[in-house]
Amino acid sequence: MKRLTLFAAAFAFAAGSAFAADDKKDPNFNAMDKDNDGYLTRAEAKGNLDLVKKWKEADRNNDGKVSRAEYLMVMGKQDVKTATKKVEKALQNKEDKAKENNASTGATK
Ligand SMILES: [Ca+2]
Ligand SMILES: [Ca+2]
């Protein structure tokens, strides 16, 4: 149950930021897309080591280019991981505090 909530929170967080990025035209994607054709070639992407490493995974339709949607999909995954870590850490802190409170007040919740 907790896992599910955690994932939902992380997903909402990541989806929210991906959506916002798409809305404003993702600055990273635009910065790399030198000729503004909406696709990243390997040469255009070479400054982004994360993307280079994930190139095969990112280029889902194997056309040798990464579209904005493909980019957001592969980078969105990374966001979920980062967001999950952040949420996990926040929950951990909350639990620690709750334990402290329980210990001092004797509350059962
Ligand atoms: Ca391009
Ligand atoms: Ca592609």
Image (tube, grey):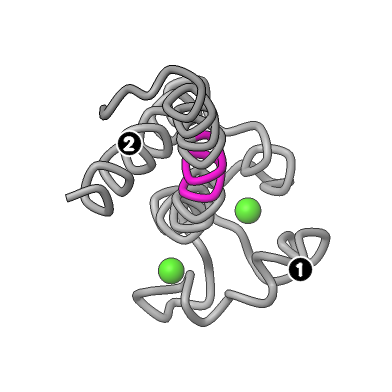
Element under disc 2: helix
Mark in the foreground, 2 or 1: 2
The residue tagged 2 is: 9
Comparing 34 with 10, the one in front is 10
Comparing 45 with 49, the one in front is 49
Number of marks present in the image shown = 2
- Would residue 39 appear left or right of 12 to someone viewing this image? right
Q: Which secondary structure is most common in the magenta stretch?
A: helix
Classed neighbour count for the residue bearing mark 1: other residues with Cα under 10 Å, few (<14), some (14–19), many (≥20): few
Disc 2 + disc 1, Cβ < 8 Å:
no
Residue with the most extreme left position = 1
Where is residue 25 shown, x and y percent of the image? 52, 28
- Would residue 25 appear left or right of 77 to someone viewing this image? right
The residue tagged 1 is: 43
Q: Disc 2 to disc 1, how far (Cα)?
A: 36 Å
Comparing 84 with 11, the one in front is 84
**Is 30 part of what is drawn in magenta?**
no
Q: Is residue 47 above or below residue 11?
A: below
- Which residue appears at 65% of the width and 32% of the height? 27
Q: Is residue 64 above or below residue 51?
A: below
- Which residue appears at 50% of the width and 56% of the height? 81
Q: Amino acid at mark 1?
A: Ala
Residues rendered magenta in the picture: 84-90
Q: Amino acid at mark 2?
A: Ala
Quarter where residue 41 is shown: bottom right
Specify the label residue 30 is tagged with: none
Image quadrant in which the C terminus is located: top left
Q: Is residue 90 above or below residue 7?
A: above
- Which residue appears at 40% of the width and 55% of the height? 73
- Which residue appears at 21% of the width and 50% of the height? 4
Q: Earlier in the sequence, mark 2 or mark 1?
A: 2
